[in-house]
C-alpha cells in the first residue's frame, strides 16, 4: 500500500493495472493470509489480502512484473510456485472466504499452516 492509496482495495486495483494492464470490474476481498518467518523473529509477519475478480477490462499484457499465462485448473504448476499456494488457491477457485497463517523458515520452506473457511463479511478490516 502506498501513501496515495485510499485503502488496501485501491492499492490492489492500482497494482493490478500497473502489473497486468487490466482493470478489475468486480474485485472483492475473499481472503487474508499472514506469513510468519519463524526463524527470523525480528522480521514482522506479512498480512496479505486476497482479492478475486471475475470481470475485467483491458488486455492482460506482459510487464516487468509478470507474464500472463493461462492454465486449466488441474494443470496449475504449483510445484513452480510458493509452497503455500496449493493450499489456499482452491478456496479462491471455489469462491470461499478464508483466513490463514503460514509459517516459513529459510524464506521458502513451509513448516506448517492453519487455513479456515470464514463466513462472507467476517474478514476484519485492517
Image: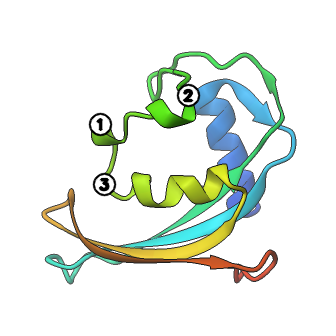
Q: Nearer the viewer, residue 78 or 5?
A: 78
Residue 55 position, x and y percent, is 83, 35
- Mark 1 to mark 2: distance in Å? 15 Å
Q: Note whether 5 is above or below 16 in the view shown.
A: below
Q: Nearer the viewer, residue 35 or 63?
A: 35
Residue 95 position, x and y percent, is 72, 57
Closer to viewer: mark 2 or mark 3: 2
Whichever of labels 1 and 2 marks the residue nearer the N terminus, that label is 2
Residue 34 position, x and y percent, is 45, 74
Q: Of the numbered discs in the image, which one, if any, rests on residue 80?
A: 1
Residue 39 seen in render: yes
| 69 horizontally vs 96: left or right | left
Do the CB atoms of the residues marked 1 and 2 lie less than 8 Å apart?
A: no
Residue at x-position 33% and y-position 78%: 44
Q: Nearer the viewer, residue 50 or 114?
A: 114
Neighbor class of circle 3 (other Cα within 10 Å; few <14, some 14-19, many 20+) is some
| 28 horizontally vs 112: left or right | right
| 122 horizontally vs 41: left or right | right
Whichever of labels 2 and 3 marks the residue nearer the N terminus, that label is 2
- Residue bearing the label numbered 3: 83
Image quarter hosting the C terminus: bottom right
Neighbor class of circle 1 (other Cα within 10 Å; few <14, some 14-19, many 20+) is few
Residue at x-position 44% and y-position 60%: 87
Q: Secondary structure at mark 1?
A: helix
Q: Note whether 2 is above or below 25 in the view shown.
A: below
Q: Note whether 31 is above or below 95 in the view shown.
A: below
Q: Of the numbered discs in the image, which one, if any, rests on residue 99?
A: none
- Residue bearing the label numbered 2: 72
Neighbor class of circle 2 (other Cα within 10 Å; few <14, some 14-19, many 20+) is few
Residue 94 position, x and y percent, is 68, 55
- Mark 1 to mark 3: distance in Å? 9 Å
**Which colour assignment does the render follow?**
rainbow
Amino acid at each position: 500500500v502506498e501513501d496515495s492509496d485510499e485503502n488496501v482495495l485501491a492499492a490492489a486495483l492500482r497494482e493490478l493495472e500497473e502489473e497486468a494492464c487490466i482493470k478489475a470490474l468486480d474485485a472483492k476481498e475473499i481472503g487474508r493470509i499472514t506469513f510468519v518467518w519463524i526463524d527470523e523473529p525480528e522480521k514482522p509477519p506479512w498480512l496479505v489480502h486476497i482479492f478475486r475478480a471475475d470481470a475485467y477490462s483491458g488486455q492482460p499484457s506482459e510487464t516487468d512484473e509478470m507474464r500472463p499465462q493461462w492454465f486449466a485448473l488441474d494443470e496449475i504448476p504449483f510445484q513452480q510456485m510458493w509452497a503455500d499456494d496449493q493450499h489456499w488457491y482452491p478456496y479462491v477457485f471455489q469462491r470461499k472466504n478464508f483466513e490463514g497463517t503460514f509459517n516459513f523458515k529459510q524464506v521458502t520452506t513451509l513448516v506448517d499452516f492453519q487455513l479456515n473457511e470464514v463466513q462472507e463479511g467476517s474478514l476484519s478490516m485492517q
